[in-house]
Image (spheres, helix red, strand yellow):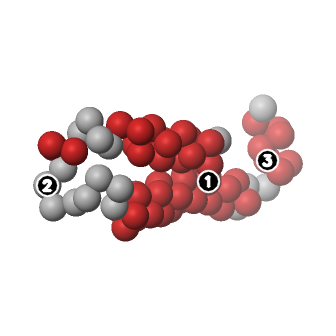
């Protein structure tokens, strides 16, 4: 889901960047460094959002979890 959102968001950003060029200071309209760094930050946040709950789930005994359900 993150990859689809990233692809759609990058596409929309590239399409709308001409209209927003007056609001961008110090960055070109199609700045690859900005696009790559934003995508990398998004992927890092998604990775943390996935890994932290998975790590916590591995610490729980399955019998205890099933008993509490």
Q: Marks 3/1: CA distance?
A: 23 Å
Secondary structure under the numbered disc 1 in the rendered image: helix
Give the mark nearest the N terminus, 3 or 1: 1
- Look at mark 1 in the image and give the residue it sits on: 50
Number of marks drawn: 3
Whole-percent x, y for residue 23 in the image: 15, 43
Secondary structure under the numbered disc 2 in the rendered image: loop
Query: Looking at the image, is mark 2 or mark 1 nearer the viewer?
Result: 2
Q: Are marks 2 and 3 in contact (CB under 8 Å)?
A: no
- Look at mark 3 in the image and give the residue it sits on: 64
- Residue name at image x 62 percent, y 42 percent: 4
Query: Looking at the image, is mark 3 or mark 1 nearer the viewer?
Result: 1
- How packed is label 3: few (under 14 Cα within 10 Å), some, or many (20 or more)? few
24 or 18, nearer to the observer:
18
* Residue 38 in which image quadrant: bottom left
Name of the residue lying farthest toward the front: 18
Q: Is residue 41 visible?
A: no
1 or 67, nearer to the observer:
1
- How packed is label 2: few (under 14 Cα within 10 Å), some, or many (20 or more)? few
Question: Which numbered tag is attached to residue 25?
Answer: 2
- The quarter of the image holding the C terminus is top right
Q: Is residue 49 left or right of residue 65?
A: left
């Amino acid at each position: 889901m993150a990859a689809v959102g990233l692809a759609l968001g990058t596409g929309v950003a590239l399409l709308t960047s001409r209209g927003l060029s007056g609001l961008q200071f110090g960055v070109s309209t199609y700045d690859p460094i900005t696009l790559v760094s934003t995508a990398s930050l998004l992927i890092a946040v998604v990775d943390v959002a996935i890994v932290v709950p998975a790590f916590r789930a591995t610490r729980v005994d399955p019998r205890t979890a099933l008993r509490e359900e």
